Image: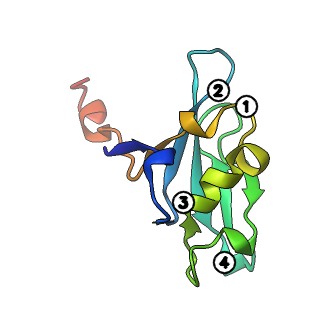
């Protein structure tokens, strides 16, 4: 799993499935992860959904067209950096945001075989 802070990206595109993890949640030790999702099939556009925690699955924000990277369905890293606190999540600084490009699935086969 590759992780980098959001602030180190130049203006790059982030596509559907990109995950942003931030300190937050019920206790200070909790991590809240948000995921970009493509809802263009529903004429909505790109959105941010809570991927973990009590509100997992909740559509937190539908992103405006100006968030898109050039003329793509992807979201601009620069737009996220400039608008994180105001639009996405105001409970942490943009410097605390970690980008996870690909989540690793759990080893459900090992669990089903009793190996874990």
Q: Are marks 4 and 1 in contact (CB under 8 Å)?
A: no
Quote the CA–CA distance across marks 3 and 1: 19 Å
Whether 2 is drawn above or below 114: the answer is below
The residue where tag 4 is placed is 40
> Could you say whether the residue bearing mark 2 is in a helix, strand or loop?
loop
Quarter of image, res 23: top right
Task: Return the disc, 4 or 3, that comes first in the chain's sequence.
Answer: 4
Q: Residues within 10 Å of mark 2 (few under 14, many from 20)?
A: some
The residue where tag 1 is placed is 91
Q: Residues within 10 Å of mark 3 (few under 14, many from 20)?
A: many
Q: 54 or 76: which is nearer to us?
A: 76
Q: Residues within 10 Å of mark 1 (few under 14, many from 20)?
A: few
Which of discs 1 and 2 lies nearer the camera? The answer is 1
Task: Return the disc, 1 or 2, that comes first in the chain's sequence.
Answer: 2
Which of discs 4 and 1 lies nearer the camera? The answer is 1
Decide if residue 59 is in sight here.
no
Q: Residue at x 58, y 21 (%)?
A: 30
Whether 101 is drawn above or below 12: the answer is above
Which disc, if any, is residue 24? 2
Question: Residue 24: horizontal and vertical position, in percent?
Answer: 64, 26
Q: Residue at x 56, y 16 (%)?
A: 29
The residue where tag 3 is placed is 77
Which of discs 4 and 3 lies nearer the camera? The answer is 3
Quote the CA–CA distance across marks 4 and 3: 19 Å
Task: Return the disc, 4 or 1, that comes first in the chain's sequence.
Answer: 4
Task: Return the disc, 2 or 4, that comes first in the chain's sequence.
Answer: 2
Q: Are marks 4 and 3 in contact (CB under 8 Å)?
A: no
Which of discs 3 and 2 lies nearer the camera? The answer is 3
Question: Residue 99: horizontal and vertical position, in percent?
Answer: 46, 46
Which disc, if any, is residue 5? none
Decide if residue 73 is in sight here.
yes
Q: Residue at x 62, y 15 (%)?
A: 28
């Amino acid at each position: 799993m590759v992780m980098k802070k959001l602030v180190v990206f130049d203006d790059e595109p982030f596509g559907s499935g990109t995950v942003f993890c931030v300190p937050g949640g019920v206790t200070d030790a909790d991590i809240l992860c948000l995921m970009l999702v493509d809802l263009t099939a529903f004429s909505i556009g790109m959105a941010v959904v809570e991927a973990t925690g009590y509100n997992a699955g909740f559509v937190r924000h539908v992103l405006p067209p100006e968030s898109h990277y050039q003329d793509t369905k992807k979201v601009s890293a620069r737009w996220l950096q400039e608008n994180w606190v105001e639009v996405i999540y105001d409970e942490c600084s943009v410097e605390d945001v970690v980008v996870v490009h690909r989540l690793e699935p759990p080893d459900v086969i090992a669990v089903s075989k009793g190996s874990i």
